[in-house]
């Protein structure tokens, strides 16, 4: 029996998958940027939000270029071995590309370097005394990221940063976060939604009432979808967008600086890696005195 034409699936969209085209373009753009910028930064993102990442891109548009694409493609563009790296030591950054992370190519100005460690004086690289940027000095990019932490509403699966309880009586728009005299009563149309989310509310003369305190979440607990919906309904933000620089590469010296962790902007543990020929030298630094799948920069 012939197949019925009535069962034919008709796609209403004309959008074609970019697939390999986007991958090749990301690879080519990264390769083109390496000789144009003196610094390359590997960064990771906590509590990813597209609108905040777009703000970061806009703030860095004058002297930097940001890529946030497939990590394997970005690592391949930097080189996966000394023989495939486009510039000396760029392949050392590839090991830091894991999870939600990206690359920033920047012209950001750095402070004058301190004297080089004695163990680097025998390196075959040509280090300049005064104009060579030092990877031990945190760049202005790190300072910018250390102060940029916009808040956002938490999503399911994240940890609660504090406890939140709805007070008894008339429910207000902020759920008791501000005095009732400065707040507005919750709209009566939201009462059925609250009951569906497990809040034992009732309507009394057009007001949403709660007979007993209701704990929405406890500090340190994993939030569910219903809890995040309630938190958003009452305007409680528990997520913080943050960008952390993991490592950076200096073109002129071929030095890769690995940041020890959050808070290492003005001081802290870090390691400095220099490749001399085929060997790698890693120095543990003392306290320093001194920073969407397929979503990449378009110009």
Image (cartoon, rainbow, N blue to C red):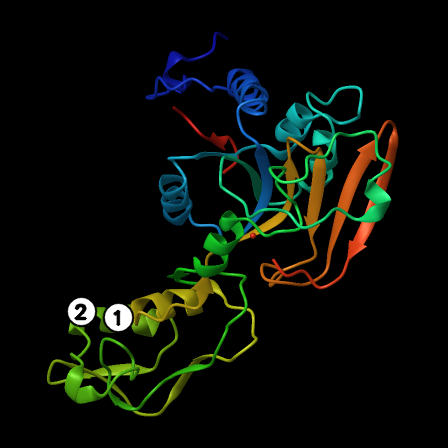
Say whether residue 178 is left or right of residue 125: left
Give how far across and how far down residue 281 sits, in percent: 85, 41
Give how far across and how far down residue 179 sits, in percent: 23, 88
230 up-or-down from 261: above or below: below
Q: Which mark is residue 253?
A: none
Say if mark 2 contacts mark 1, CB within 8 Å.
yes
Give how far across and how far down residue 194 sits, in percent: 31, 72
Residue 234 visible (yes or no)? yes
Residue 231 found in image quarter? bottom left
Q: CA distance from mark 2 to mark 1?
A: 7 Å
Residue 214 found in image quarter? bottom left
Mark 2 crowd level (few <14, some 14–19, many ≥20, 10 Å Cα):
few
108 up-or-down from 178: above or below: above
Q: Identify the residue under disc 2.
A: 189
User: Is disc 2 placed on a helix, strand or loop?
Assistant: helix
Residue appearing at x 50%, y 8% in the figure: 1
């Amino acid at each position: 029996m012939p197949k019925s034409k009535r069962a034919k699936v008709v796609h209403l969209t004309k959008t074609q998958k970019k697939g390999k085209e986007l991958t090749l373009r990301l690879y080519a753009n990264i390769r083109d940027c390496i000789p144009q910028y003196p610094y390359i930064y590997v960064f990771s993102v906590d509590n990813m939000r597209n609108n905040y990442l777009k703000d970061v891109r806009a703030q860095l548009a004058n002297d930097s270029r940001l890529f946030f694409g497939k990590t394997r493609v970005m690592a391949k563009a930097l080189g996966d071995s000394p023989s495939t790296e486009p510039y000396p030591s760029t392949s050392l950054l590839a090991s830091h590309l894991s999870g939600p992370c990206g690359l920033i190519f920047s012209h950001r100005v750095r402070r004058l370097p301190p004297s080089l460690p004695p163990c680097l004086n025998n390196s075959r690289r040509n280090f300049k005394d005064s104009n060579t940027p030092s990877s031990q000095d945190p760049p202005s990019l790190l300072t910018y990221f250390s102060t940029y932490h916009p808040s956002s509403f938490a999503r399911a699966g994240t940890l609660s940063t504090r406890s939140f309880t709805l007070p008894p009586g008339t429910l207000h728009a902020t759920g008791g976060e501000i005095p009732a005299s400065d707040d507005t009563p919750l709209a009566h149309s939201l009462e059925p939604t609250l009951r569906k989310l497990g809040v034992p509310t009732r309507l009394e003369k057009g007001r949403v009432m709660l007979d007993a305190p209701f704990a929405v979440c406890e500090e340190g607990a994993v939030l569910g979808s219903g809890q995040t919906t309630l938190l958003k309904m009452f305007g409680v933000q528990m997520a913080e967008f943050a960008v952390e620089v993991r490592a950076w590469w200096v073109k002129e010296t071929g030095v890769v600086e690995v940041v020890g962790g959050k808070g290492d902007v003005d001081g802290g543990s870090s390691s400095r890696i220099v490749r001399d020929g085929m060997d790698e030298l890693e120095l543990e630094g003392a306290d320093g005195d001194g920073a969407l799948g397929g979503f990449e920069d378009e110009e």
